[in-house]
Amino acid sequence: MLALSPPLFPSFGWPLELDPINQDHQINDCFYGDHQCTETTSESFLHFPVPSELPQQLDQLDRSTPSTTAISSDLNMVKKLNHNASERDRRKKINHLYSSLRALLPATDHTKKLSIPATVSRVLKYIPDLQQQVEGLVRKKEELLSKMSKQKGNLVHHDDDQENQVKTAAARSSLSSVSASQLNDREVAIQISTYKVNNNPISEILNTLEEDGFSMLNASSFESFEGRVFHSLHLQRN
């Protein structure tokens, strides 16, 4: 004979087989009897034993499933951490900006660490000072440019004068001759031969020599034929 295996579904204490005679008797009593049978049958139908392991399984299910309160608490914690991280980044950026602003101040202000309000106050005072310095430098630049322009014009005019003097001297030198001989360490004798048409008076020659550091000890002049003039000068170095 085959051994009977336990049923797939537990009976939870319900009788699997009912006596047909008793079953018919109970049905007749319920239909033709008093109302008490109906209540008794309903109570017996609804009241069935609960398996002993069911409460433990329900308890484990409650523990394994997170509650709505715990999830809400975790979300609040994540939001708080994100807010704190954003606030730290914002403060770091602000401190970096103030450090850059503090670095623009003069070196005398770097000897001590200024607070943020003190830094802002010092910068507000320092900006007008810088503006005044810039305006002063602009004025100096304009003055220097004006002087350089004038000097350039004077230099061009002076170069033209020098060029004319050189040309005049060259023209005169073609008609004049000069010789000099050193008498001692301080005395010099100069002979000048020129034409009268050059219109070069001896006074101009003496003024030029005095500017070069010579003083006249003796001078003589005479005129020869064909309008040539001879000058003999005895000079001493100062």
Image: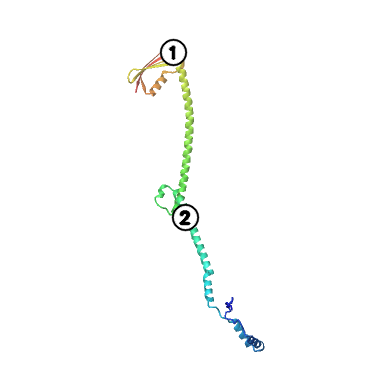
Outermost residue to the bottom: 33
Q: Nearer the viewer, residue 218 or 139?
A: 139
Q: What kind of element bears circle 1?
A: strand
Q: Which mark is residue 181?
A: none
Side of 66 relative to 35 (left or right): left
> Does residue 141 lie above or below 185 as drawn?
below
| Residue 101 in the image, given as x and y percentages of width and height | 46, 50
The quarter in which the C terminus is drawn is top left
Q: Residues within 10 Å of mark 2 (few under 14, many from 20)?
A: few
Side of 193 relative to 20 (left or right): left
Q: Nearer the viewer, residue 218 or 212?
A: 212
| Residue 84 in the image, given as x and y percentages of width and height | 48, 60
Give the residue displayed 41% in from the left and 49% down from the top. 110
Q: Which mark is residue 228?
A: 1
Three-letter amino acid code of the residue under disc 1: Arg
Q: Mark 2 sits on what residue?
A: 92
Three-letter amino acid code of the residue under disc 2: Lys
Side of 232 relative to 163 (left or right): left
Outermost residue to the right: 32
> Does residue 4 lie above or below 238 as drawn?
below
Outermost residue to the top: 225
Question: Which one is earlier in the sequence, the residue at label 2 or at label 1?
Answer: 2
Give the residue displayed 47% in from the left and 26% down from the top. 159
Q: What kind of element bears circle 2?
A: helix
Give the residue displayed 48% in from the left and 36% down from the top. 145
- Kindly indicate whether the residue at mark 1 contacts the one at mark 2 (C-beta within 8 angstroms): no
Q: Nearer the viewer, residue 191 or 45?
A: 45
| Residue 139 in the image, given as x and y percentages of width and height | 48, 40
